[in-house]
Image (cartoon, grey):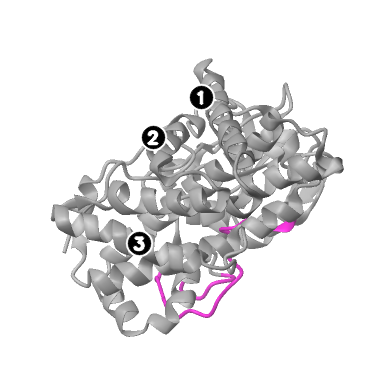
Amino acid sequence: MSVEQLETAGADAPLVDFPLSRRGDVLPAECSWLREKAPVARVRTLTGDSAWLVSSHALAKQVLEDERFSLKDTANAGVPRQYALTIPPEVVNNMGNINSAGLRSAVMKSLNPRQPGLQDFLRTAAHGLLDALEAEGGPADLRAGFADPFSAALHCEVLGSPFEDWRRLMAGLDVAFMTAAEPFADSTLNWYKDVGYFAAQLNAQLARPEAERTGLLGRFAGLKEADPESAHLTDDMFATVAVSLFGAGAISTSSFLVLAVLALLQRPELIGYLRAHPERMGRAVDELLRWNLSIGDALPRLAMADVQVGEVRVKAGELVLVLVEGANFDPAVFEDPDRLDLEREAGPHLSFGAGRHFCPASALGRVHAEIALEVLVERLPGLRLAVPAENLVWRTGFIKRLPERLPVAW
């Protein structure tokens, strides 16, 4: 919808069909208008349901931190939705399920980026992937040849599953994170196929001596064997945690990395800056997180009570969608927000969410991105887009804004 159409929309009608543009390298045209003129705006979702879209930083932060806005209840039967569920409803509250099952300690230890050997493993994996790309020669697809397998490598290592299975695991995410107006039966088949895979990997860990067990599945094997408080947990319960962590983690880190690299390729001077100042990579990643448009469908919450949000009284049972790019480009919080400034002081962006559902793997995600970009700019200082940016093909019907391919040369 154009800004002119927004200006003339009726007060009671949904202003926007949501989601907005699927292109991940251009801020949606409606974003600034919504934040300035209608920071809590009624929109129509893929399912045809009505929702409130919150686009200013202050109000987005309010919604994410107020526990009267629930994530787990967005999966309830009969409530308004962003899109049809493609995963079991109980999985929406993954960290809550992990906590209630007594698995938080094991999960958080596995998500620690400072665990021995992990960062060396990531550097070795990144160099190995670039060795293969250079041997093949450019142009090459940086998403298929680097971002996807590098993200999968991290999560296979963290979980304790073999990296050689990365393609089948990433392919499952293409179905698991589809966004559709209506449910489709084979989304369930897709989910339980991967649950079965991780259940088999858990049993493979159990068959090993304790000293040879690896990753989160190795920790789960120890709990299954020796912890009476975990005796009630089935193999499928353990596997469900692994599927959820791989899915959410691998698709988020890969999508972020693809769009971060694309942003740098469109500003080649920034690649030179990072190569000259590797010590500033942490600050640069934080700014790239603010800038990143990979969250294509907003963060959903269901109001569990009547709550005042700005000038709107949101009623219990209504769906609220937090527009992350609205918050992250809010000039009330970020000076000159439309400029990608790798020297910007770290700011309160909402790319990892906020409140009780702040991403538990945020530190791991940062390290993953820092190492990937460090190796890329070191090894390929002449990295460039091999096609015009306007010719990139952007995926539709997916939870992330994502180009199907990222052709590069060097």
Majority secondary structure of magenta residues: loop
In the image, which is nearer the foreground, mark 3 or mark 2?
3
Left or right: residue 308 versus residue 395 is right
Provide the residue designation for mark 2: 396
Identify which residue is drawn at 53% across, 60% down: 365
Q: Position of residue 174 (x, y in %)?
A: 43, 33
Provide the residue span drawn in magenta.
332-356
Residue at the front extreme? 209
Task: For marks 3 and 1, give the one nearer the viewer.
Answer: 3
Q: In the rendered image, is residue 59 in sight?
A: no
Q: Residues within 10 Å of mark 3 (few under 14, many from 20)?
A: many
Say which element carries label 2: loop
Dot label at residue 126: 3
Is residue 353 in the magenta section?
yes
Is 188 left or right of 310, judged from the image as shown?
A: left
- Between disc 2 and disc 1, the foreground one is 1
**Residue flagged by tag 2: what amino acid is it?**
Thr
Closer to the camera, 256 or 55? 256
Residue at 60% across / 27% down in the picture?
A: 85
Q: Earlier in the sequence, mark 3 or mark 1?
A: 3
Disc 1 residue type (three-letter): Asn
Residue beneath label 1, please? 190
Say whether residue 87 is magenta: no
- Picture layout, residue 127 above or below residue 33: below
Asked which secondary structure carries label 1, the reply is helix
